[in-house]
Image: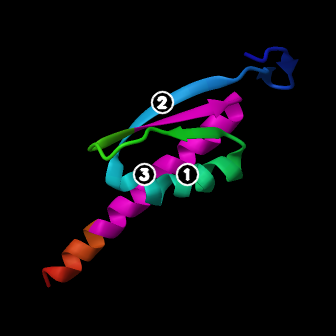
Amino acid sequence: MDSGVIEGGLNVTLTLRLMMHGKDVGSVIGKKGEYVGKDTGTLINISEGNCTERIITLAGPTPALFTASSMIILKLEEDFSSSIEKSEHSHV
């Protein structure tokens, strides 16, 4: 683990794991993590398999993890809102 002091805090690499529905991973994270990883400088690993839930592992400094997790949450919210709107319009 990298350590040292940088402006605003410690310079450490942290790991964060998220569990997501397998069907949501591609649209939220991007193919092989490219959407979030490239934009934030976070290393991303997505568990293999066709199971219902997949494990997303994010690794990087705290600011990068904060940005990546915020992007993921906002994308999930956007996709959820979009699916609700489609559902409401199909019942009209």
Q: In x, y percent, where is residue 88?
A: 20, 75
Whether residue 75 is visible to the viewer of this picture, yes or no, is no
Q: Would you say the residues marked 1 and 3 are in contact, meaning their CB atoms lie under 8 Å apart?
A: no
Q: In x, y percent, where is residue 17?
A: 48, 30
**Circle 2 is placed at which residue position?**
17
Q: Is residue 16 left or right of residue 19?
A: right
Answer with the quarter of the image where residue 35 lies: bottom right
Query: Foreground residue, 91 or 52?
Result: 52
Residue type at mark 1 is Lys
Q: Secondary structure at mark 3?
A: helix
Residue type at mark 3 is Val
Q: Residues in magenta? A: 55-83
- The mark nearer the N terminus, 1 or 3, is 3
Furthest residue in direction left, as rendered: 91
**Circle 3 is placed at which residue position?**
25
**Which quadrant is home to the C terminus?**
bottom left
